[in-house]
Image (cartoon, grey):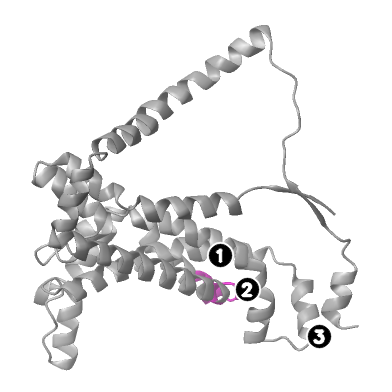
Amino acid sequence: MSGTGQLLATVPPASVKGPWRPPRHRHLRGSDFRWAIAFVLPYAAVFLALVVYPAGYALWMASDPSLYTDLIENRLYLSTVVNTLLFVGLGVNVKMFLALLLSGFFLRPRWWIKGLLAVYVLPWALAATQACIAFHWMLIGEQGLVDGLLSALFGIDGPLWFNNRWLGLGSNSIAYIWKWMPFWTLIFLAARMTIPQNIYDAAEVDGATGIRRFVHVTFPLLANLYLLCTLLSTLWTLGDFTTVYLVSGGGPSGSSEVLATLGFHYAFDFGRPALGAAAVMSALPVLIPVVIVLMRRLQPRSVQL
């Protein structure tokens, strides 16, 4: 029997009995019930005031079908939908894949790698506003760091990053990856640290080393976490406003906008809050399936060892 097979043979079989159900508790009565209501009521009021009411009001504002006709007839909206899909697709998938790979690098027990990890997490530790403004100034013409280095080292003039749609969209995506990749790297690093060393030892006996160990051992053990993090990151990225607004500003002429910034401009710059709400709510056909899949993956199950 192989080393991995011997290790797995020593583990008792696990049986999954279906959806987990909480144990029954006795009903609260008298003063216990009143105290429970007193503790729950403030949180319920805050939830209704800050979550349910704003979301319901936005849905009501965006319920007029003529708003979506106006959106589709606007050339800027269709390009914004494409920008949003590219921004979310590139930002999420590149960020998560690189974070997974870098988590293996930072797992190595060397002092200089630990020091490098402290520097690596700085973009995430910074507030989003300061990080995005710093990235904007690094790309703003000859005064910026990137074009200044190109001119000083190679004697060439750098591009005008925010005068081209694709350069502006690429700048937004890179800034987003740079800002949030350290956070997910730490998540995957913590998950890697929970994998027992004896599993790797057994895999090494079977000849799984290097890239084979990652493919056949590490990734299968982290696959569920990777999927959950990707879905959660997709939800956050669809609603990301700060990065695009502060890095490229949606320029040139709104050609690098995403739905979150377009809705903001409709509501505050053009004085059409209902159209702004409709622009943001048009992402619901993507959001709802992601939320459903996320909730199904998070459904607890009872496992007997």
22 part of magenta stretch: no
Q: Which residue is mark 1?
A: 226
The first of marks 3 and 1 along the sequence is 3
Q: Where is mark 3, residue-wise?
A: 205
Question: In the image, residue 22 lies at what x, y percent?
Answer: 72, 35
Q: Which residues are magenta?
A: 105-115
Q: Name the residue: 59% across, 51% down.
A: 296
Q: Earlier in the sequence, mark 2 or mark 3?
A: 3
Dominant SS type (magenta): helix
Packing grade of label 2 (10 A; few <14, some 14-19, many >=20) is some
Alpha carbons under labels 2 and 3: distance apart: 18 Å
Residue 191 bears which disc, if any? none
Circles 2, 1 touching at the beta carbon (< 8 Å) = yes
Please name whichever residue, 108 or 182, is drawn nearer the observer in this view of the structure: 182
Which residue is identified by label 2?
219
Rendering coords of residue 50 (x, y %): 36, 31
* Residue 278 on image: x %, y %: 24, 46
- Name the amino acid, label 3: Val
Q: Quadrant of the C terminus?
A: bottom right
Q: Nearer the viewer, residue 190 or 248?
A: 248
Say what secondary structure mark 3 lies in: helix
Q: What is the quadrant of residue 143 in the picture?
A: bottom left
Residue 105 appears in view: yes
Q: Residue at x 19, y 71 (%)?
A: 168
Mark 1 nearby-residue class (10 Å; few <14, some 14–19, many ≥20): some
